[in-house]
Amino acid sequence: MINLRSRVRLVAPVIALVLLGQGCLGGSSNKATGPDGGIFRTADGGDTWRQLQVINIGSKRASIANMGIVTMAVDPQDVNTLYAGTTENGVIFSNDGGESWQPATGLSVGRVNAIAVDSKAKCTVYATIANQIMKTTTCSRDWTRIYYDPRTDKSFTTLVSDWYNPNVVYAGTNDGDILRSDNAGESWRVVHRVEGVRVNQLVMDPRDSRVLYGATQGAGLVKTTDGGQTWTSIRKEFEAFENARRPNLIVLDPSNANRVYTISKYGILQSDNGGSSWTALKLPTPPGTVEMKAMAVHPKDAKRIVYATNKAVIWSVDGGTTWTTKKLPTARGAAFMLYNKAETPALFLGASPPPSN
């Protein structure tokens, strides 16, 4: 068991930001006409998108339109408070539903793969950066390193905070470890290991926090129903679907406890029995032809499903029976999609990193 805490401040200047002049502070509709990164929002099913650009840096305003977005999270207690992990600029956050953003003091540089927000303490947030897990209890005014792995080739890839008992936090790594903390990050222990395989994502059931699924890069899914004491491998169940053992994403149906979706290069698979068996959704593109990394299910209508490719956003209003293809607001592709839980939920889309030269 590891117990390691040290206060750190990452104070290198925020990069990849463009200062905005008078009259350039609003977001754009539909396709971005300038830098096409950052975060986009739609409230009408993808007919129109708004690029959310403004970030406040002290007394100046700049743009996040060139940022690559890795992950996003919404505060369970406040639909207007959003967090985003970026490829180079650490954590940015918004307290006004995305209209404007701020860099996280002390965590404004580096790649942040995962963010988890405490379900009961609004100002408590966890984030991963390389081989460290960071925590703030001051609404991002400062951050404390609560876990550090001395192996520089190890990185933390995913985080989950228990919505029932927020002292419990889970983390996954790029070499197959799943860790659990029972004291809000003071100490950690490995509760499962998938040897040498990256844990892409951990997802917790919104009805029973003892149930978690883990997506791995090559070994299918792992599942626990007892808070990590025992784990079941869901691997053979994917044999009929090529590349499905490398799921990029798990999505849980908000209204059906047993319905689980996975996204992989094969396509989208659906289980209605908690992962015991799977069927493939019929998509507009043939299986194995498109890499998909972003998907979301509407929080108030589970028949409304959306996923994104590098070229388009594809929508269904009937649970995947039929689909409508619409343009992406960015040429980069979507790295992440997230619905908030407002009265009229909005969909946020994080743009992938810019192409390398």
Image: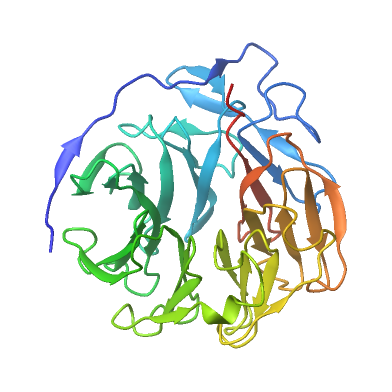
Residue lying at 68% horizontally and 40% vertically, measured from the top left:
40
| Of the pair 1 and 205, the residue shown nearer to us | 1
Q: Is residue 156 above or below residue 170?
A: above
Residue lying at 28% horizontally and 82% vertically, measured from the top left:
229
Q: Is residue 135 above or below residue 180?
A: above
**Residue 163: image location, x then y, percent:** 40, 70
Residue lying at 52% horizontally and 34% vertically, measured from the top left:
101
Residue lying at 51% horizontally and 77% vertically, measured from the top left:
235
Q: Is residue 55 above or below residue 312?
A: above
| Of the pair 46 and 27, the residue shown nearer to us | 46
| Of the pair 236 and 63, the residue shown nearer to us | 236
Horizontal arrangement in the rendering, residue 276 relative to residue 196 (left or right): right
Horizontal arrangement in the rendering, residue 257 relative to residue 182 (left or right): right
**Residue 180: image location, x then y, percent:** 27, 67
Is residue 66 in sight in this rendering? yes
Horizontal arrangement in the rendering, residue 143 relative to residue 284 (left or right): left
Indicate the quadrant where residue 222 lies: bottom left
Is residue 123 in sight in this rendering? no
Q: Quadrant of the C terminus?
A: top right
